[in-house]
Image (tube, helix red, strand yellow):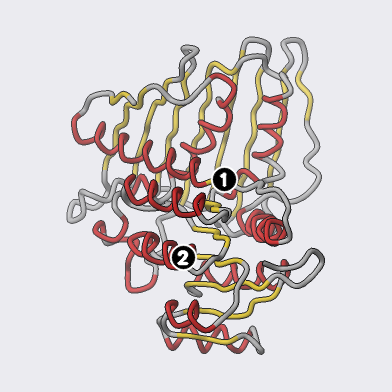
């Protein structure tokens, strides 16, 4: 692997709309050695922006020909398992976009493979490296609200982008829509309640806007219970506009209220705030730097470069990714049956 202080050699699988942001973040963190992108149009666009990078139509050829320290996977979800397995078998540390996989058995295989080869497997739950959402976690862990008992995580946004060849609107390639974005909020809820134990049960509801696609649940709400009797409510609608997210946490000794707003999820100049109530007074918490998925992506890739140099993994782990997938699978089961599902 890369020597401490040397250039970390990255390979990228997938360089579409979101993959192009990954490519730019990699260029800041290390060296973008190679990109595997099936689309000729995608390769041409990326080649113009990243001269000196080698491009492949097939990631298997890239892995066979290039010596890489880290592979970053930004493929449609149904391709995650095969791409991740190939990268780990090639001896590379791995950053895998969420959802980790569409099946829990596949998650287990990747976790075991990474562990057996002494490699780090990170999952793209970028909120964990956020200056805003991460600050909430720091304050919870420091006892700012006592023991957490209630959490509301809500997203109001415009509809999803189609994705290459319309994959995001093809349920066979997505698995279910809960795996698309609510998965981030399941990860946040479990992270914030980490001090009291893992989730106990989930109850979920979903509704659709398009009658010709009832499987695409634009509106979604879930309640996750925890061992201390506390619970988190996750709500989202894709029938709104712009991109607005709120987290409200209450505990035995106080409360936190965080909010983020932008014209879209990749806004470079959003508005955000964090307020803390200690039971007596409310104060505004300063956020040192911008928050948003583009900034958090840069933090993720910088951390993967640290990992390649022997540093500590700060991203979500494979085990975290598996839990998030499990929550989404159980939530879909709850939507389908109309009943709570226990773990």
Q: CA distance from mark 1 to mark 2?
A: 21 Å
| Proximity of marks 1 and 2: CB atoms separated by less than 8 Å | no
Q: Which residue is mark 2?
A: 89
332 with respect to 188 (left or right): left
- Position of residue 31 relative to residue 269, above or below, is below
Q: Residue 235, how many percent across, how many down?
A: 43, 35
Q: State the residue at coordinates (54%, 72%).
A: 12
Residue 72, given in percent of the width and then of the height, sits at: 55, 65
For marks 1 and 2, give the one nearer the viewer.
2
The label shown at residue 339 is: none
| Residue at mark 1 | 316
Q: Secondary structure at mark 2?
A: helix
| Mark 2, other Cα within 10 Å: few <14 / some 14–19 / many ≥20 | some
Q: Residues within 10 Å of mark 1 (few under 14, many from 20)?
A: many
Location of residue 79 (image quadrant)? bottom left
First in residue order: circle 1 vs circle 2: 2
């Amino acid at each position: 692997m890369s020597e401490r202080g040397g250039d970390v050699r990255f390979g990228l699988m997938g360089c579409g709309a979101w993959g192009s942001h990954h490519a730019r973040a990699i260029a800041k963190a290390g060296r973008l050695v190679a990109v595997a992108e099936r689309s000729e149009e995608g390769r041409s666009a990326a080649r113009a922006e990243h001269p000196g990078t080698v491009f492949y139509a097939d990631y298997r050829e890239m892995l066979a020909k290039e010596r890489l320290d880290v592979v970053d996977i930004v493929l449609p979800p149904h391709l995650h398992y095969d791409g991740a397995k190939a990268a780990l078998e090639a001896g590379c540390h791995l950053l895998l976009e969420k959802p980790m996989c569409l099946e829990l058995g596949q998650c287990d295989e990747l976790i075991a493979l990474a562990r057996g080869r002494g490699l780090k497997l990170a999952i793209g739950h970028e909120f964990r490296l956020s200056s805003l959402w991460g600050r909430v976690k720091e304050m919870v862990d420091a006892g700012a609200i006592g023991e957490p008992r209630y959490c509301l995580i809500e997203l109001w946004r415009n509809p999803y982008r189609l994705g290459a060849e319309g994959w995001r609107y093809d349920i066979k390639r997505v698995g279910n829509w809960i795996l698309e974005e609510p998965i981030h909020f399941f990860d946040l809820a479990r992270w914030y309640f980490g001090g009291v134990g893992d989730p106990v049960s989930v109850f979920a509801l979903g509704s659709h806007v398009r009658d010709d696609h009832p499987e695409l649940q634009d509106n979604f709400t879930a309640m996750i219970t925890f061992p201390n009797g506390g619970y988190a409510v996750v709500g989202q609608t894709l029938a709104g506009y712009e991109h607005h997210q709120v987290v409200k946490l209450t505990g035995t000794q106080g409360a936190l209220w965080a909010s983020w707003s932008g014209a879209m999820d990749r806004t470079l100049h959003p508005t955000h705030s964090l307020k803390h109530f200690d039971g007596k007074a409310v104060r505004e918490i300063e956020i040192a730097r911008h928050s948003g998925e583009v900034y958090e992506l840069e933090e993720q890739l910088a951390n993967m470069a640290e990992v390649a140099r022997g540093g500590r993994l700060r991203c979500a782990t494979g085990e975290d990714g598996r839990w998030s997938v499990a929550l989404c699978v159980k939530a879909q089961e709850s939507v389908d049956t109309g009943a709570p599902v226990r773990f």
